[in-house]
Image: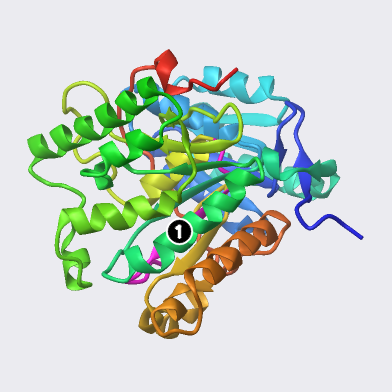
């Protein structure tokens, strides 16, 4: 009898293990976006996903994100599409992908002869890679090798009492099984920093958690705009504190093992907070302009899949990693059933308990890791966005259990 917690994964040359087998088409400036989209479009139902960075001015954060995403364990091979005169270090990115053992090819539109020639060359290369996807070696993957991220979007008054704490229950089970679980975002945890610090595995880490949330509060104060949106109020949320406590409940009750920044991979199993607010002065505007910016950062930290809590009803998925929707509001679930995976609103109606929905979320996480498609995957959602940010490297107290 097979082990229900053992996953049959895709084995990558760099030793990592993925739960999906994706060909990535990545544009390196907005000027190459159309060509990259045209290359990927005919293969949209064949595990070919489009990602990219639209900026022309170089940005170390974007470079780090693209390197992490293009070498993600769910990625089989990569086509890079450049205009040719952008500042992005395409040679460095190609070298990073090649160094991970993945096939990579670069097209420069200016030297390839323009749009039509570039699209033809790109489609021919992608077609070749798609035909070879079944050749990817498979092997066992334990739960201790799994990384799961979580985010909430389109939150309402039900989110913090159904879907979010149910995800927290699932996170506790994942951590107990040795998996790594990542929650975010610091801008939606304002007021919860001291509670989190009490859960930190060291006092030094606790101070780092408090500092990360304080940085977010200062950042939003300068901008004059926080994470509390009109849609949250329309859904019955009343204050930032109420939203923060709801967002916090996604973390469960496990000790917090570390603090990450985008592109940092958890060194071992445990619960981690992802700091998504840029370091330094306020330079690049609102830290995350939509939920998919946060999802991309969770994936860049190695998340194999994302648990997404929504009360109002979000339909987004993501490139590279599957997104599992946990719907907080029973009315939203009935109205948008095709877009949702789990009906946590049953808790409100007395049809299930928090523990039962938490167990269902944990079981569904394993099923998706074992190959079951999520609702957003079945509908073809592959949203992606990457903007400008700036981060300093982690200090030693951020990952006290890394050795």
How many circles with numbers are drawn on the protein?
1
Q: Quarter of the image containing the C terminus?
A: top right
Q: Which residue is mark 1?
A: 308
Q: Is residue 132 left or right of residue 164?
A: right
Residue 63 in sight here: yes
Image spot of residue 332 (x, y percent) = 37, 79
At a point 14% along the width and 59% down the height, the residue shown is: 239
Q: Is residue 343 above or below residue 40?
A: below
- Residue sitting nearer the eye, 83 or 146: 146
- Residue sitting nearer the eye, 176 or 316: 176
Specify how the rendered protein is coloured.
rainbow
Image spot of residue 165 (x, y percent) = 42, 60
The quarter of the picture where residue 104 lies is: top right
The quarter of the picture where residue 197 lies is: top left
- Residue sitting nearer the eye, 125 or 363: 363
Badge 1, how many Cα within 10 Å: few under 14, some, many 20+? many
At a point 65% along the width and 40% down the height, the residue shown is: 178
Q: Which residues are magenta?
A: 302-315
Image spot of residue 132 (x, y percent) = 81, 45
Q: Is residue 233 left or right of residue 182?
A: left
Which residue, as the protein is rendered here, is positioned at the far right? 1
Residue 307 colored in magenta in the image: yes
Image spot of residue 272 (x, y percent) = 47, 36
Q: Is residue 201 left or right of residue 388?
A: right
Secondary structure type for disc 1: strand
At a point 27% along the width and 37% down the height, the residue shown is: 194
At a point 66% along the width and 37% down the height, the residue shown is: 73
- Residue sitting nearer the eye, 234 or 383: 234
Residue 45 in sight here: no
Q: Quarter of the image containing the N terminus?
A: bottom right
Residue 115 colored in magenta in the image: no
């Amino acid at each position: 009898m097979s082990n229900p917690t053992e996953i049959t994964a895709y084995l990558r040359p760099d030793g990592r293990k993925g739960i999906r087998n994706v060909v990535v088409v990545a544009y390196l400036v907005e000027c190459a976006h159309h060509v990259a989209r045209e290359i990927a479009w005919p293969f949209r139902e064949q595990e070919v996903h489009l990602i990219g960075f639209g900026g022309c001015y170089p940005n170390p954060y974007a470079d780090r994100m693209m390197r992490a995403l293009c070498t993600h364990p769910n990625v089989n091979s990569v086509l890079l599409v450049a205009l040719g005169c952008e500042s992005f270090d395409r040679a460095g990115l190609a070298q990073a992908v090649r160094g991970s053992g993945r096939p990579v090819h670069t097209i420069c539109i200016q030297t390839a002869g323009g749009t039509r020639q570039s699209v033809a060359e790109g489609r021919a290369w992608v077609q070749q890679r798609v035909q070879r996807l079944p050749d990817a070696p498979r092997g066992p993957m334990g739960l201790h090798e799994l990384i799961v991220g979580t985010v909430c979007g389109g939150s309402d008054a039900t989110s913090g009492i159904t879907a979010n704490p149910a995800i927290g229950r699932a996170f506790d089970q994942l951590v107990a099984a040795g998996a790594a679980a990542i929650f975010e975002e610091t801008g939606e945890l304002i007021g919860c920093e001291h509670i989190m610090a009490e859960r930190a595995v060291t006092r030094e880490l606790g101070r780092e958690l408090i500092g990360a949330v304080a940085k977010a509060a200062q950042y939003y104060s300068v901008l004059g705009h926080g994470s509390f949106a009109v849609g949250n109020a329309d859904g019955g949320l009343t204050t930032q504190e109420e939203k923060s406590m709801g967002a916090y409940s996604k973390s469960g009750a496990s000790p917090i093992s570390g603090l990450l920044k985008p592109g940092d991979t958890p060194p071992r199993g445990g619960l981690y907070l992802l700091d998504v607010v840029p370091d330094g002065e306020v330079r690049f505007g609102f830290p995350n302009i939509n939920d998919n910016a946060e999802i991309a950062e969770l994936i860049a930290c190695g998340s194999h899949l994302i648990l997404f809590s929504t009360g109002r009803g979000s339909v987004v998925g993501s490139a590279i990693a599957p997104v599992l929707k946990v719907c907080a509001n029973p009315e939203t679930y009935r109205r948008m059933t095709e877009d949702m995976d789990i009906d946590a609103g049953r808790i409100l109606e007395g049809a299930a308990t928090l523990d039962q929905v938490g167990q269902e979320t944990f079981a569904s996480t394993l099923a998706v890791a074992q190959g079951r498609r999520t609702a957003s995957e079945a509908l073809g959602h592959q949203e992606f966005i990457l903007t400008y940010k700036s981060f300093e490297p982690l200090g030693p107290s951020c990952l006290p259990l890394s050795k």
